Image (cartoon, helix red, strand yellow):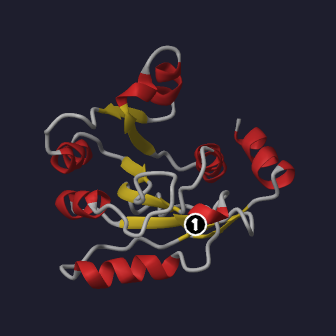
Amino acid sequence: MKWLAKLIYFKILGWQAIGNTSFSKNTVKKAIIIAVPHTSWHDFYIGVLLRAVTGVKTNFVGKKELFVFPFGLFFRALGGAPINRQTNENKVEAIAKLFDQHDEFRMTMAPEGTRKKVSKWRTGFYFIAKQANVPIIMFTLDFKNKRNVISEPFYPTDDMEADFEFMHNFYKGVIGKKPKYS
């Protein structure tokens, strides 16, 4: 299947993967991977194709409504886990515990929390990384240039403002599928 993913990603769609294309998989078995900008459902299949061409096992959480039959089988096979966004449970703590339960666990998230334009990212991914003591790996969903640029692992510090500035700078100039939401 990897050859098919490469054919679609590189040849048919014309995308490029640049930077840390191994997602440091030999040295970093656990990480939060953030994808920005998240502007369209097209981001999902680009991420799935990128995962296939790099050979990096990743996971994701999604709202439980996405995991109903028959789609639930598909999403679980892709490494998805449903989460109930309506309850009052501490989601950061619950997700951080997932890292303790696996030898290898790389969770992909969209810090915007929606496909619409936002003025401020959600912070859950950051606190999950801090609580689970795992790095953040950033990758772009740059539809304008048809490329995914992947960062080296970044360990959050105790200066959240500086960390977010660093991460936002990584995504400067990146245009998503729907530019008005980038």
Q: Quadrant of residue 8?
A: top right
Provide residue 110's location: percent of width, then percent of height.
Answer: 44, 55
Is 28 or 39 nearer to us in this picture? 39
Is 181 or 48 nearer to us in this picture? 181
Vertically, is 97 above or below 151?
above
In-image side of 19 versus 120 (left or right): right
Provide residue 96's location: percent of width, then percent of height.
Answer: 22, 49
In-image side of 131 versus 29 (left or right): left
- State the SS at label 1: loop
Provide residue 148's location: percent of width, then percent of height.
Answer: 64, 64
Which residue is disc 1 drawn over? Answer: 182
- Give me the residue at 60% from left, 44% from top: 41
**Label 1 is placed on what type of residue?**
Ser
Looking at the image, which residue sits at the far right?
A: 11
- Give me the residue at 45% from left, 28% from top: 66
Looking at the image, which residue sits at the far top?
A: 69
Vertically, is 1 above or below 145?
above
Crowdedness near tag 1: few (<14), some (14–19) or many (≥20) residues, C-alpha within 10 Å: many
Vertically, is 177 above or below 95?
below
**Location of the C terminus (image quadrant):** bottom right
In-image side of 166 versus 54 (left or right): left
